[in-house]
Amino acid sequence: MARKTATRRAAGATRYFVLQQSGRDTKHVFTGRQPRQAALKAATRGYTNIVLRERGRRRLHIFTGSRKRIKAPENAPKWMQGRQIWKSTVKKKGIKHI
């Protein structure tokens, strides 16, 4: 009898999330340890309705996001000082199992 072995991720493993639009995968892949980190990257690029499919798992992570221009913080690197940067925010709406 074959024994099933559980697959476990390493503690700090990078996960891959594929952006979906209209129920279909796009070519955009965002990485992060957590789904929220990948969603923040998508929001920074201007996406507002964010649906991320986690590679290797049967889940959809659903977020709403926005971004706004802010002044670079005081402790920013020298090349970034005096510039405007994008500040993104996301809110998780839920998880859908597929």
Image (cartoon, rainbow, N blue to C red):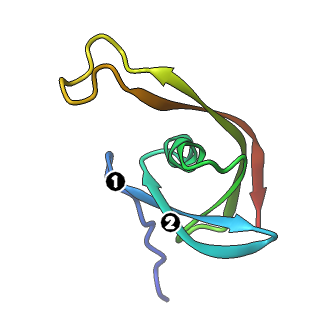
- For the point 66% across and 51% down, the residue is 47
> Image height check: is 15 above or below 11?
below
Q: Where residue 54 is drawn, which disc sits there? A: none
**How many C-alpha atoms fall within 10 Å of the one at disc 1: few (<14), some, or many (≥20)?**
few
Element marked by disc 1: loop
Where in the figure is residue 96, as x and y percent of width and height?
78, 57
Q: Identify the residue position indicated by label 2 in the image.
A: 29
Farthest-out residue, bottom: 1
Out of 68 and 64, give the one closest to the viewer: 68
Where 21 falls versus 46 (above or below)?
below
Residue 77 image position (x, y, % from top left): 20, 24
> Which amino acid is tagged 1?
Ala
Report helix, strand or loop for mark 2.
strand
Residue that badge 1 annotates: 13
Determine whether 74 is above or below 50 in the image: above
Q: How many marks?
A: 2
Question: Can you tell which of label 1 and label 2 is closer to the viewer?
Answer: 2
Name the kind of residue labelled 2 in the image: Val
Residue extending furthest toward the right:
22
Query: Does 96 sit left or right of 82 as displayed?
Result: right
Task: Give the Cα separation between the discs numbered 1 and 2.
Answer: 16 Å
Which image quarter: residue 88?
top right
Q: Is residue 49 left or right of residue 55?
A: right
- Tell me residue 97's x, y (percent): 76, 61
Of the pair 75 and 10, the residue shown nearer to us? 75
Q: Residues within 10 Å of mark 2 (few under 14, many from 20)?
A: some
* Of callouts 1 and 2, the N-terminal one: 1
68, 91: nearer the viewer? 68
Residue in view at x 26 percent, y 13 percent: 75
Q: Residue at x 54, y 43 (%)?
A: 44
